[in-house]
Image (tube, rainbow, N blue to C red):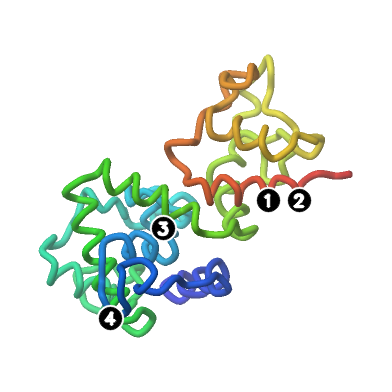
Amino acid sequence: MKGFVLFLLTGLFGGSAWAGSAEQCGEEARPCVEYGALVFQQRCALCHGSDGLGEGILPLSVKDYPKTNLLEPRYGTDPETVMRIVKSGGARPPVSPEMPPWGDELTATQLESVVQFVNYLRQDLDGALAMLRAKAKELPPSLKTGRAIFLGRCALCHGRTGEGNGKMARIIKNPPPFNLTKSGAPDDYLRRIISGGGASVGRSPRMPPWGNDLSANEIDSVILFIKTLRNY
């Protein structure tokens, strides 16, 4: 699984542009919380979620995946321990072997910045979430990310191919989950209904709002994937 995580991360983010610490922190090789939030979104959100609360793509997709909520730590929370976990991952028990080691993947500045951000997340959740949302806007949407989120969040109702035939379709009636293969809605409309739920646009209130669970980048990624399901 650890190798799969690294493979998936490369597929999702390998082509994205990295902003340097000079841009984020004011000078090169200087770590800062803001840079850590950006690196977190690029490297850590897959497992820990875009808000660090554990609802990442992998925990929602893989059965019995270890809990990854950073506000419910199972190991030490001092900066030294957090740095060891980030660098070595599951190579050093008792950390789960599903945690990949980042010591050879990230620079010293990126590692220190991520550690600063994780500590900040645990001290000021609202401030950290606002920072994560801002950094998410700097990332380009990804079709692979959108597909993974759709399968983890949306397929239960809309079905894996978007035809409205998910497992919940037998329960949700009047109206049933929408057949997304027939949707011609523009991006702005999709963004509003995904963020605010069906009630926000006068549609079924059974469509839940995802604005507090998904980042702007993740929502735009889902929209990219939804458009591939259209059969016209």
Q: Distance of mark 3 from mark 2, alpha carbons?
A: 24 Å
Foreground residue among 74 and 145: 145
Characterize the local packing of mark 3: few (<14), some (14-19) or many (20 or more) Cα atoms within 10 angstroms: many
Residue 222, x across and y down, in percent? 61, 47
Foreground residue among 130 and 30: 30
Q: Quick one: which residue is furthest to the front in this view?
A: 26
**Residue type, mark 1 in image:** Phe
Foreground residue among 228 and 168: 228
Q: On residue 228, which mark appears?
A: 2
Kindly identify which residue carries mark 3. 45
**Is residue 40 left or right of 32 when viewed as pictured?**
right
**Residue type, mark 3 in image:** Ala
Residue 205, x across and y down, in percent? 57, 19
Q: On residue 225, which mark appears?
A: 1
**Is residue 80 left or right of 63 when viewed as pictured?**
left
Which sits earlier in the primary sequence, circle 3 or circle 2? 3
Q: Secondary structure at mark 2?
A: helix
Q: Are marks 2 and 1 in contact (CB under 8 Å)?
A: yes
Which sits earlier in the primary sequence, circle 4 or circle 1? 4
Characterize the local packing of mark 2: few (<14), some (14-19) or many (20 or more) Cα atoms within 10 angstroms: some
Looking at the image, is 14 positioned above or below residue 182? Answer: below
Q: Distance of mark 1 from mark 3, alpha carbons?
A: 19 Å
Looking at the image, is 102 positioned above or below residue 170? Answer: below
Which sits earlier in the primary sequence, circle 2 or circle 4? 4
Characterize the local packing of mark 4: few (<14), some (14-19) or many (20 or more) Cα atoms within 10 angstroms: some
Q: Are marks 3 and 2 in contact (CB under 8 Å)?
A: no
